[in-house]
Image (tube, helix red, strand yellow):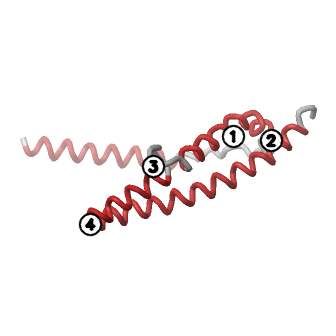
Amino acid sequence: MPVNRKAAAAAAVASLAVAGALLAAAPAQAAPTPTGDGSKAICKRLPKTEERVTKALTRLNGDAGVVGSVARLEQRVNNAKSAGHTEIQTYLNDRLTYRKGLVTTLQTRQNDLKSVATWCGTQSGK
């Protein structure tokens, strides 16, 4: 039986090599270049985007009882520190740093969306 397994393995490797060569030889199809800035679609999606950003900020700014909040993660970091789990504390602290940065990013995005909403309101007739 070992001979059959070796032959089957060799055949599988050869077929993968042939398939890879065929895929590499196929010309890549380029996406068409955009003709506009997508403003119509952005304005259409704006209410859902604003809702999603607001919901995320509400969750992140929640108290320690809200799953996904900065306060809850801070509590977990403190719990890991008091338990002496330094590796867990380091890991959670890195997540906390990212999450605090996410709050700033989402606040900036929320302000940008307000400007976009104003612009979209002026473009409805055009």
Q: Nearer the observer, disc 4 or disc 3?
A: 3
Which of these two is toward me, 21 or 84? 84
Q: How crowded is mark 4: few (under 14 residues within 10 Å), some or many (20 or more)?
A: few
Q: Which residue is drawn at 32% across and 61% down?
A: 80
Residue 101 spot, x, y in % from top left: 57, 60
Q: Nearer the observer, disc 2 or disc 3?
A: 3
> Which badge, 2 or 3, is on the more N-terminal residue?
3
Question: Residue 50's mark?
Answer: 1
The residues bearing labels 4 and 3 have C-alpha atoms spaced at a distance of 21 Å
* Tag 1 and tag 2, C-beta contact below 8 Å: yes
Q: Is mark 3 on a helix, strand or loop?
A: loop
Residue under circle 3? 64
Q: What residue type is labelled 4?
A: Gly
Compared to residue 11, the image places residue 95 above or below, namely below
Q: What element carries label 2?
A: helix
Q: What element carries label 4?
A: loop
Q: What residue type is labelled 3?
A: Ala
- In the current view of this chain or complex, which residue is farthest to the left? 1
Q: Which residue is drawn at 35% across and 64% down?
A: 89
> Which badge, 2 or 4, is on the more N-terminal residue?
4
Compared to residue 55, the image places residue 79 above or below, namely below
Q: Residues within 10 Å of mark 3 (few under 14, many from 20)?
A: some
Q: In this view, does 79 lie to the left or right of 29?
A: left
Within the image, what quadrant is residue 40 found in?
Answer: top right
Residue under circle 4? 84
Q: What element carries label 1?
A: helix
- Report how many numbered discs are placed on residues in the image: 4
Residue under circle 2? 117
| Quarter of the figure that contains the N terminus | top left
Q: Nearer the observer, disc 1 or disc 3?
A: 3
Residue 51 spot, x, y in % from top left: 65, 37
